[in-house]
Amino acid sequence: MTDLDDWPKTLRLTSAQVDSFLPEASADEIGRVRQWWEELFFPESKSVKWFTEWLALTQHEQSKHPEQPEKTELPKHFDPGPYQQVINFLQKTGDTSGLDTIYIRSKNEERHQACKDSNILTFPGCVYLSAAFLVGYGRRLVIAVIASILFVVFGAYVFRKQEKPKFKKKFIAPTVTDSVSPATHTPSDEYVPLRWAYSFDMFIPLIKLRDKHYNDVDFTGKIRFYLYAHKLAGWILGTFIVASIVSLTK
């Protein structure tokens, strides 16, 4: 399933060796053979649907039982090799839409396999791929950006619940003409805004916008646990956004 130009000059097989693929022929004959090969394996009519159907066949092993001469399909097992072959081919042909479809399908198969055989070692991979599924494994940049914006907005709403008062009250001794002690407001030294800027600062990884966000803020209760989830989501979505941008520049 690769272009003829990528084939090696010598093909080594088990107990066999093929030194050439074509006999000595003229350029026209070689061109006809090449055209036949491309029409057979890579015609324009072979869409992404054809590749997905072919890939589905590669994910099943075939065996023969001694008592049953017919082939018996063994349980499905994810094999990334065929997917990578198709992805490499689509990259060379510039089919970005088909490339994204096949890439997402391969990650879906990997996720199913990881979650089906989940144990202590593979459970983190299952969780990561399940979260990645929601944003198209980084191939859907718009989804990742929208999800990030929603996290920042929701985080601002949650964090402000433990925001300290912006002003502190100061009472002045009453004067002769005052019947009560008037109250004035002065800025509080402990006040740290816990809204959009704080939520965004906690969400983006590896960057600190303001040291006060890290040194003077200490949440309690359920908000502290949400902060951990908020930061983890930032790492995951940030990774996908960077991967998407890098893929667009290739």
Image (spheres, grey):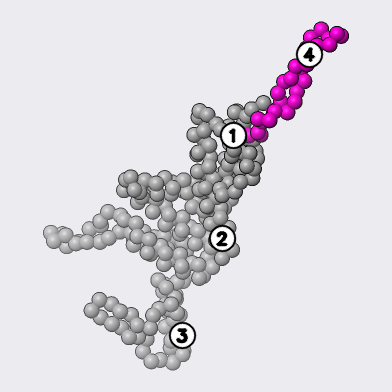
Could you tell me which residue is drawn at 22 percent across and 58 percent down?
Answer: 72
Label 1 sits on residue:
217
**Callout 1: 10 Å neighbours few (<14), some, many (20+)?**
some
Separation of disc 2 and disc 3 at Cα? 37 Å
Separation of disc 2 and disc 4 at Cα? 65 Å
Q: Identity of the amino acid at label 1?
A: Val
Label 4 sits on residue:
173
Q: Quadrant of residue 123?
A: top left
Sequence order check, earlier mark of 2 and 1: 1
Instruction: Please report contact status of discs 2 and 3: CB closer than 8 Å, yes or no.
Output: no
The residue segment tinted magenta is: 166-194
Instruction: Please report contact status of discs 1 and 4: CB closer than 8 Å, yes or no.
Output: no
Question: Of the residues tagged 2 and 1, which is closer to the observer?
Answer: 1
Farthest left residue? 67
Label 2 sits on residue:
246
Q: Identity of the amino acid at label 2?
A: Val
Separation of disc 2 and disc 1 at Cα? 35 Å
Label 3 sits on residue:
31
Separation of disc 3 and disc 4 at Cα? 101 Å
Which dot marks residue 243? none
Could you tell me which residue is drawn at 50 percent across and 39 percent down?
Answer: 229
